[in-house]
Amino acid sequence: MGTLEGKVAVITGAGSGMAKESTKIFVREGARVVAADISGAEEQTAAEVGDAVHPVHCDVTKEDDVAALMAAAVERFGRVDAVLNVAGIGTGGPITKVTMEDYDKTMDVDVRGVLLGMKYGIRAMLETGGGVILNWSSIGGLNASPFGTSVYSAAKAAVISLTKAAAIEYGRKGIRANAICPGFIQTEIMGAAGAQRFPEMEEKAALKRSGKPSEVAEVAAFLASDRASYVSGVVIPVDGGWTATLA
Ligand SMILES: NC(=O)c1ccc[n+]([C@@H]2O[C@H](COP(=O)([O-])OP(=O)(O)OC[C@H]3O[C@@H](n4cnc5c(N)ncnc54)[C@H](O)[C@@H]3O)[C@@H](O)[C@H]2O)c1
């Protein structure tokens, strides 16, 4: 019997990367998953993983889309036990070069998208007595970097703040909320080129390698399960020891 048997999870960004891997691992553990993405690739995820996955086209920046996403989960599977707000984008540039277009885009997807996922996800969970929010921040949300990630870092710090607010506001109603801060993870979008472009990033991790999407998704599966029933309001780096260094 899996650790997520009988649970229903909504996962955003599920057409790619860590969200797609989370979809696979949640289903392996017995969950049914509503896989949401703006790209259309959520259909492919569902085709690959099987009947336990219901794909929904959704732009997390649009309030109507997110409300409809949670409604689709309830209609298809009867409830929402976990929401994984994974969808995110990273725009680059140091502070003096930031464009307001990039700023708006990043804040829209990375902050507004997470806020909406929590707003409608928590509303759905309250109907059945509670649930789990897992928000994808980043080690960039904990500290600044020399890689021109100023606005991205600010957005991911906001995700941490919103996560703690959700934990505090809804803990008494049976909601747990935690933030995951991945380090350098080799997702489809980075591919092999990611390590080639930023070899120093692999070097930064104490483990001297990048992470695999599954290494983050396994942590998410634990946090969404009842085995983590007393874990709320925490911020967990999954970064191979990157943030442990002074350098
Ligand atoms: N890969 C890393 O090294 C890394 C490190 C730290 C944090 N993160 C964060 O982890 C999360 C997942 O990263 P990943 O590398 O797996 O990403 P990815 O780029 O592989 O996948 C992100 C998915 O989000 C979807 N998406 C983008 N905008 C959307 C929108 N408006 N509505 C719905 N879906 C949308 C994309 O279509 C894509 O399928 C992101 O929030 C990212 O910022 C990634």
Image (tube, rainbow, N blue to C red):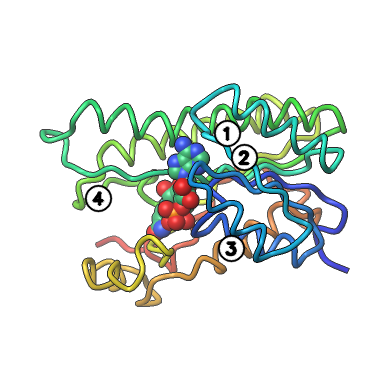
The residue identified by callout 4 is: 145
**Marks 2 and 3 in Cβ contact (< 8 Å):** no
Do the numbered discs 1 and 2 sit on residues whose CB atoms are within 8 Å? yes
Q: Quadrant of residue 74?
A: top right
Q: CA distance from mark 4 to mark 3?
A: 27 Å
Disc 1, SS: helix
Q: Residue 45 at what x, y percent from top left? A: 61, 59
Residue 236 point in image, percent of width and height: 54, 53
| Residue at left offset 48%, top offset 70% | 212
Q: N-terminal of the two: label 2 or label 4?
A: 4
Q: Nearer the viewer, residue 225 or 81?
A: 81
User: Badge 1 is on which residue?
Assistant: 164
Quadrant where the C terminus lies? bottom left
**Kind of residue at disc 2:** Gly
Residue 139 visible (yes or no): yes
When asked about the image quadrant of residue 88, the answer is top left
Q: In terms of sequence position, does the residue under pointer 1 or pointer 3 come before the other?
A: 3
Residue carrying label 3: 21
Which amino acid type is marked by label 4?
Ser
Q: Nearer the viewer, residue 42 or 201?
A: 42
Q: Earlier in the sequence, mark 1 or mark 4?
A: 4
Percent position (x, y) of residue 12? 58, 44
When the figure is inspected, residue 198 is found, relative to residue 112, above or below; the finding is: below
At label 3, which amino acid type do we have?
Answer: Glu
Residue 181 seen by the camera: no
Cα distance, mark 1 to mark 4?
Answer: 23 Å
